[in-house]
């Protein structure tokens, strides 16, 4: 007995429009930041160019994931493409971690051999970046319903903060003439990137490895189900995420030996508890009657099994059939 629920696809058109605008704006800013970083000899600006290049990739992956998630399930992919966004988020976060490591190594190297930078160029370019990244982050916040879009939002929000830090760093260099501020600022940006990415990697890996959804305890689910009238026992319980917003569950439920019409009422109550308390809408619940036991994956009444064993003994006593 099971209940199916399609993934939530409402608002996909608006989300794609936001992502298209974000892609165009980010690509333009990457080019500007890269050219300015090379002219100003600023590692912080070059770090921002690399970070924003990863943002462009992140947004592109998110855009592709949103497109695939709108495609319906078929015979080959019975759950549809719900994990396309999860996979995109994992790739985005893993890319950010690699970039943060590169920025950190480059910053440590520059601390030992400081390079003169042009703080005014840093500040002008970074100011434009704060406006652009802040605008994109605000737009993404309005449509960030799953882990895919949350990862893209974290990219842009992190960029907004780190770009604002570049402005502060440029001001510090302008006032003090201390060029070591630039690599130290890069280390801070790298740490911010690493911190924001680690949580996304953990969440997406948990989904891809079909772990229990974050915040759900199997003991609590089992207790709530066993509290439903007519339920004797709940076992072989499995809960996992189809996507970042869609949860599924499969289990065996022991009930009394009652007519199917009565068991349908128990099923309805169980699905109500799972939907309202735990937001689980895709369920597969197998009923078992009291007085049955499981044999090689099949539930067989004890009386029937005993009769079958007696029949086998009788056959053995009369010889084999070829």
Image (cartoon, rainbow, N blue to C red):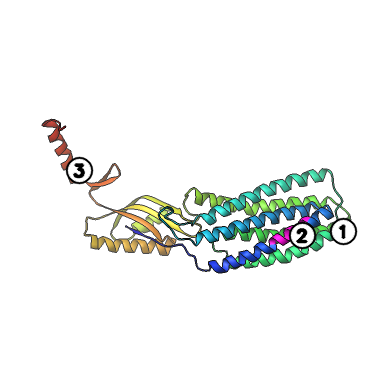
Q: Which residue is mark 3?
A: 305
- Whether tag 1 and tag 3 are in contact, CB under 8 A, the answer is no
**Quadrant position of residue 315:** top left
Q: Measure the C-alpha gap from mark 1 to mark 2.
A: 21 Å
Look at mark 2 in the image and give the residue it sits on.
32
Where in the figure is residue 213, as x and y percent of width and height?
48, 54
- Residue at the image point whose x is 30% and y is 44% from the top: 297
The residue at the far left in this view is 318
Marking on residue 174: 1
Q: Residues within 10 Å of mark 1 (few under 14, many from 20)?
A: some
Q: Is residue 43 above or below residue 3?
A: above
> Pointers 1 and 2 in contact (CB under 8 A)?
no
Magenta span main SS? helix
Q: Dot 3, crowdedness within 10 Å: few (<14), some or many (≥20)?
A: some
Q: Secondary structure at mark 1?
A: helix
The residue closer to the viewer here, 87 or 274, is: 87
Q: Would you say 13 lies left or right of 23 here?
A: left
Residue extent of the magenta highlight? 26-34
Residue drawn at (66%, 47%), measured in percent from left and top? Answer: 98
Name the N-terminal-most of marks 1 and 2.
2
Q: Is residue 28 magenta?
A: yes
Disc number for residue 9: none
- 110 over 156 or under it: above or below: above
Residue found 46% across the figure and 62% down from its top: 7
Image-based side of 137 in relation to 70, left or right = right
Dot placed on the residue nearer the N-terminal end, 2 or 3 = 2
């Amino acid at each position: 007995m099971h209940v199916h629920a399609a993934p939530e696809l409402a608002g996909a058109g608006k989300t794609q429009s936001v992502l298209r605008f974000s892609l165009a704006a980010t690509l333009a800013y990457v080019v500007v930041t890269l050219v300015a970083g090379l002219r100003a000899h600023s590692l912080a600006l070059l770090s921002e160019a690399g970070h924003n290049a990863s943002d462009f990739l992140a947004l592109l992956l998110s855009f592709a994931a949103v497109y695939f998630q709108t495609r319906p399930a078929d015979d080959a992919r019975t759950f549809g493409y719900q994990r396309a966004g999860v996979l995109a988020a994992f790739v985005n976060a893993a890319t950010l971690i690699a970039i943060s490591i590169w920025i950190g190594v480059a910053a440590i190297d520059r601390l030992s051999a400081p390079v003169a930078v042009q703080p005014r160029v840093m500040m002008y370019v970074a100011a434009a970046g704060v406006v652009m990244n802040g605008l994109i982050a605000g737009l993404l916040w309005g449509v960030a319903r799953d882990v895919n879009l949350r990862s893209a939002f974290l990219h842009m929000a992190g960029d907004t903060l780190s770009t604002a830090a570049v402005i502060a760093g440029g001001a510090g260099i302008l006032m003090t003439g201390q060029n070591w501020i630039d690599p130290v600022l890069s280390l801070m940006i790298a740490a911010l990137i690493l911190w924001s990415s680690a949580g996304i990697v953990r969440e997406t890996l948990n989904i891809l490895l079909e772990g229990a959804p974050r915040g759900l305890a199997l003991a609590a689910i089992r207790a709530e189900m066993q509290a439903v009238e007519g339920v004797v026992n709940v076992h072989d319980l499995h809960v996992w995420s189809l996507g970042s917003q869609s949860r599924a569950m499969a289990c065996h439920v022991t009930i009394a030996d009652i007519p199917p019409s009565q068991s349908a009422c128990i099923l309805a109550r169980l699905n109500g508890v799972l939907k309202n308390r735990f937001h689980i809408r895709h369920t597969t619940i197998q009923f078992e009657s009291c007085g049955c036991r499981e044999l090689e994956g099949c539930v067989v009444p004890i009386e029937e099994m005993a009769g079958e064993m007696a029949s086998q003994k009788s056959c053995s006593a009369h010889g084999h059939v070829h």
